[in-house]
Image: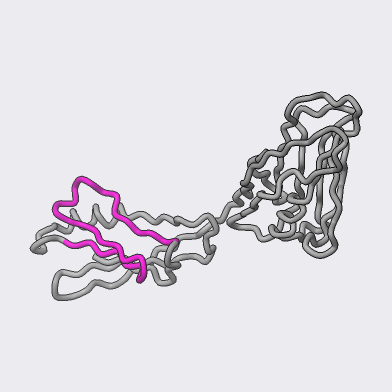
Amino acid sequence: ATFSNENIVPGQDVLAMSARSGIGNITASFNSTSGVLTLTSAGNTATLTEFQTALRSVTYANTSDDPSTTTRNINFAVNDSALGSNNITSTVAITAVNDAPVISGTTSLTYTENDAATTINTAIVLSDVDNTTLANATVTITNYVASQDILSWSNDGSTMGNITIASNTGGVLTLTSAGNTATLAQFQAALRAVQYANSSENPTAGARNIDFAVNDSALTSNAVS
């Protein structure tokens, strides 16, 4: 028996046989390039009932986090060693779901009283398997000390697209992009440019924990510090 995926997307589509009982000596082999799953019986000894059970157990899966949503047409056929049957076709409708962006890269810095505003994290890396642009980003001092801690940022006019400051209060800096059009690279450049300063002549000592996160308009990434 053969199952042929007419419009296979290599690297995404997978056909398999799930039955483990009632199939005699039938085994399965899937060609990920051609999209063909072949079921065979040693010595052509599997019965019609066993092949029927095997055929009914065939499964489809998609391994991509950004799958093509084109409907897959999957043809079923059998052969008695001399003649092939007619084909029947099943369709598989693919629904893609949004995946959250991912942020990585942690750093630490030492800030001394009266230092100038200092860049916090130049190691940030952004990725998103199914979006090329993002909606906003937040930088949060989780143990913010009022009247001391200051976050600052400015657009360099070349690498940060249309990103602007939406708000900056209480130790939370929010950056946004009009129309959610700024790219991953532009938001990455923007986050790498965020600075910290302390305005006090008697600053509260101790580490500040500063979390960075981004949002694709639907889902928020993990946070890095």
Q: Is residue 32 left or right of residue 139?
A: left
Say whether residue 88 is visible. Answer: no
Residue in the foreground of this view, choosing between 105 and 93:
105
Say whether residue 178 is visible. Answer: yes
Image vertical order of residue 110 relative to residue 159, above or below: above
**Residue at 54 percent of width and 63 percent of height:** 69
**Residue at 52 percent of width and 60 percent of height:** 67
Q: Specify start and end residues of the magenta stretch as a single range.
A: 12-40
Residue 59 in the image, given as x and y percentages of width and height: 36, 54
Name the image quarter holding residue 7.
bottom left
Q: Is residue 160 left or right of residue 88?
A: right
**38 magenta-colored:** yes
Residue in the foreground of this view, choosing between 91 and 134:
134
**Residue at 81 percent of width and 29 percent of height:** 144
- Image quadrant where one finds the C terminus: top right
Name the image quarter holding residue 9.
bottom left
* Number of marks: 0
**Residue at 77 percent of width and 62 percent of height:** 159
